[in-house]
Amino acid sequence: MTKSNASSEQLFKSTDEDYKSLFEHVGCGVYISTKEGKFLTANQVLLDMLGYKSRSEFLSMDITNDLYVRPEDRRKFRKMIERDGRVIDYEVEFKRKVGSPITVLLTSHVRYDSRGEIQGYEGIVLDQSQRIQMEEKLQIFQEDFKRLFENIPVGVFVSTTEGKFLNANQALLDMLGYGEKEDFLKIDITKDLYVNPKDRHRFRELIEGEGRVVDFEVEFKRKDGSTIPILLTGHVRRDRNGKVIGYEGINVDLTRRKRMERELQEAYDFMNKIIQSSPNPIMATELNGNIMIWNRAAEETLGYTAAEVIGKMGIDKIYPEGMARKVMQMMRSSEYGGVGRLNSFPMVYVRRDGEVVEGTLSARMLYDSKGNEIASVGSFVDLRERLEMERALRRTQEQLLQSEKLAAMGRLTSQIAHELNNPLYGIMNTLELLKTEIPLQSKRRKILEMAHSETIRLSDMLRKMLSFSKPDQEARQPVDINSVLDEILLLHEKQLRENDIKISAVLAEGLGRILASKNQLRQVFLNLIANARDAMPKGGTLTVTTSGTPDEILIEISDTGIGIPEENIGKIFDSFFTTKDEIKGVGLGLSVCYGFIKDHGGDIMVDSRVNLGTTFTITLPVNKKPDPQTTN
């Protein structure tokens, strides 16, 4: 074999292999048949298309009777292909192996033998079932689109860029008051449809710049000249070259929505006016505590403006620590008015300036349609004035009761003085006369003097009791409070030291003088120092300090003694009240002190801690009148 023959053989072999590969892998059915009606070969695609697994079974069929649904289609095919030498896109129905029909597109040409006579046919078969299904779907889609176009309850349009409608549905005609579509398609969109022609230009800029416009709010003119609010959504229409040739989209009538928005806004404004006009603070918060509503009464009562708190501050800032969480727990409980409710619960709020505001809180939980908690709203009643009035009334009642006690004691002591003074002075005079008749050296004289001394002491006791009901009418004069305290401390220094009590005195210099009864002030300080001594049976420290302002002087007398129980603090200035185990008096000491200080225009307060000590604080007004001793 020559080299040329070998190359030709190799080329033929390669070409044959390529043909076989193409035959088997082409994406359509390929066949070769005799003109009498037998397949000589077919590729796997055609076998799969017709449902045959065995190639030998497929090649043994009679094409006319076993393949064609209608045998006359086979005869027609043979007539065309033998006349023209080929058949292009001949649509026909074949039978699948299972008997079901399949529409195919047949393209074939004749095969000739060496003498030029027709030997058979060969060609390709295309499955048309998908195309037919697509055409059917397209037809359905077109019908659905037409139905949708006409029946959709919003206005649908197709228009040119120049401003003419090409098509519109009945809803758009009804919306704009046009009876005939022909009349509507004749209008100039810019002049006859838009209330403001500038809106048309703006619409064109937006839609051609971005390819679409979504929810463009505009006003259209109806045929009768009235206006209608419209929400316009559209996109551009392009030709095959991508050039914008028009627009299409929908128009939604906003008349009902605008009316509902207006009604909703009016309802909101009305409710807001009610909330803002409420004389009580009203607050609403989200579940996390962020404030949503804060009315004017809340601003005035708590000192924060709505702009400062809404969306910026938590409600816990105006509650005492931990109270915000407690309020939510109480609303979720059934014990405070029912689940989701809190009725008139005593509450305190903290103002912006730190002042505590007392009142009552009523609150409700808000729920969504599914019953989930979404927020809470509360109304606070400021009871500061009422509570202060109640406290003032209570103080007045206590003062009246105190006055009644003092009055009763005054009447009692007056009667005692009236009944005892005359016979007591008779006894004293008799004892004085007897003393002149008994020698000094006589033992009886000493007994007589002892009886006289005790009678004098009894008279002094009566005088002290009388000072409770009818204090000494000593003329008041400017008094240096430091000098009074110095005298008393000096007088009691030895006695206090014997009881192991240390004295610490810090008396401020330059204090103003007090217009007072010196004896009554001495009685007050003596009583307080005596009480301090009794409160420190094992010793301690007595501290006396003075300080002042141009208007008042402050005196503090403190001890480190046993203190006063909290339940007794409010009673110590009451008449006849005493905490001493042994009756050393009648419980009038502190009540008399209280009366003297109040009578001088001052005040006396007490602060005590059990086992730590007690402090009495006295305030007295400074005398503003000129001192006669310093004006000469």
Image (cartoon, rainbow, N blue to C red):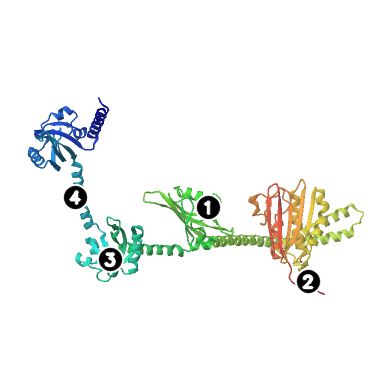
Taking depth in this image into account, of 410 and 3 the one nearest to the observer is: 3
Residue carrying label 2: 627
Q: Is residue 592 above or below residue 538?
A: below
Q: Decide which of tag 3 and tag 4 comes sooner along the chain.
A: 4
Q: Amino acid at mark 2?
A: Asp
| Callout in the foreground (3, 4) | 3
Give the number of the mark in front: 3 or 2.
3
| Amino acid type, mark 3 | Gly
Within 10 Å of disc 3 (Cα), the crowding (few <14, some 14-19, many 20+) is: some
Instruction: Inspect this view and state whether residue 323 appears.
Output: yes
- From the image, tell me which residue sits under label 3: 163
Residues marked 3 and 4 touching at CB (< 8 Å): no
- First reached walking from the N terminus: tag 1 or tag 2: 1
Q: CA distance from mark 2 to mark 4?
A: 119 Å
Q: Nearer the viewer, mark 1 or mark 2?
A: 1
Residue 215 appears anywhere in the view? no
The amino acid marked with disc number 1 is: Asp
Q: CA distance from mark 3 to mark 4?
A: 31 Å
Task: Depth check: give the residue in front, 109 or 182.
Answer: 109
Residue shown at the point (13%, 39%) measured from the top left:
93
Given the image, on which type of amino acid does mark 4 rest?
Answer: Gln
Secondary structure under badge 3? loop
Q: Quadrant of residue 112?
A: top left
Q: Give the mark nearest the N terminus, 2 or 4.
A: 4
- The disc label shown at residue 316, or none: 1
Left or right for 410, reference 53? right
Secondary structure beneath dot 4 equals helix
Label drawn at residue 139: 4
Expressed as whole percent of the image width and height from the top left, the position of residue 151 reads 22, 57
